[in-house]
Image (tube, grey):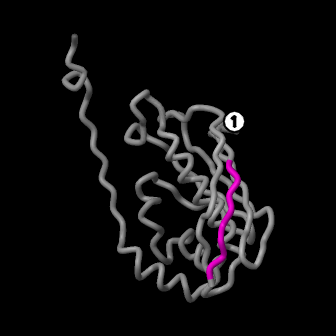
Amino acid sequence: MTDVAAEAGTRSKTITWQDPLPTARLGASMSGLEYLTAIKDGRIPGPPIAAHFGLRWERIEPGEVEAVAEPDESLYNPIGMVHGGVAATMLDSVVGCAVHTTLPAGVGYASVELKVSYLRAIHAGRGEIRAVGRVVKEGSRIAFAEGEIRDAEGKLLATASGTCAITR
C-alpha cells in the first residue's frame, strides 16, 4: 500500500475577509438593490462566504442576479469533485439575493427552503461556473425564486427552487 499523503503535493489557500457586522448594519439602511449593487461595485465588502468560494457578482438587477466563481481543488469532496455544498451555497446565494433586490431598506429575508437538483459534476480547472437567480413570485411575507448553475460551455450543472421569508 502506498502512502497517498506523501505522494500528494501540499497546497494552501489564504482567505481574507472583513468583519461582516458593520456591512450588514449598513445594508439595513439601503434597499436590497442598492446594497447588492454596492457590494458588486466594490464600494462595500462582500460577505465572508464569498471569499471561501471566490464568488463575485456579475449582474444585479431587480428580481435577478448573476454570480460567478472558479472552483479549485480546495472545494473537492472525498471522491474527487467539487462538493455539492458549493453548488447549494451558490444557489442559495443567488436565490436569496434575487429576492433581496426587490426589498426596500430595513426589510430582509431568510431562506426557508432550498431544493437543489444536481445534474452534472463540477470539477476544478474547467473555468468559471455561473449562477443565476430570479424571482418567480414576490409576496409580502414569502417570496419564491429559482436558480441555476452553468459551466463555461453553458452546460447546466444544477438547478434550485427556493422560498424566502420576508422579515420586517
Q: State left or right for residue 2 relative to residue 103.
A: left
Residue at 56% over, 44% down:
128
Residue at 47% over, 59% down:
50
Chain part drawn in magenta: 160-167
Residue at 26% over, 26% down:
8
Which secondary structure, mark 1?
A: loop
The C terminus appears in which quarter of the rendering? bottom right
- In the rendered image, which quarter is residue 67 located in? bottom right
Magenta residues, dominant SS class: strand
Q: State left or right for residue 26 relative to residue 64.
A: left
Q: Residue furthest top?
A: 1
Question: Please, what is the three-letter code of the amino acid marked with disc 1?
Answer: Lys
Examine the structure image and report whether residue 24 is included in the region drawn in magenta.
no
- Answer few, some or many: residues within 10 Å of disc 1's Cα (few below 14, many 20 plus, some between 14 and 19): few
Q: State left or right for residue 153 relative to residue 46.
A: right
The N terminus appears in which quarter of the rendering? top left
Residue 66, image x, y percentages: 65, 58
Seen from the viewer's position, the closer of residues 118 and 150 is 118
Residue 5, image x, y percentages: 22, 26
Residue 142, image x, y percentages: 72, 71
Residue 125, image x, y percentages: 48, 34
Q: Which residue is mark 1?
A: 155
- In the rendered image, which quarter is residue 111 located in? bottom right
Q: Residue furthest right?
A: 137
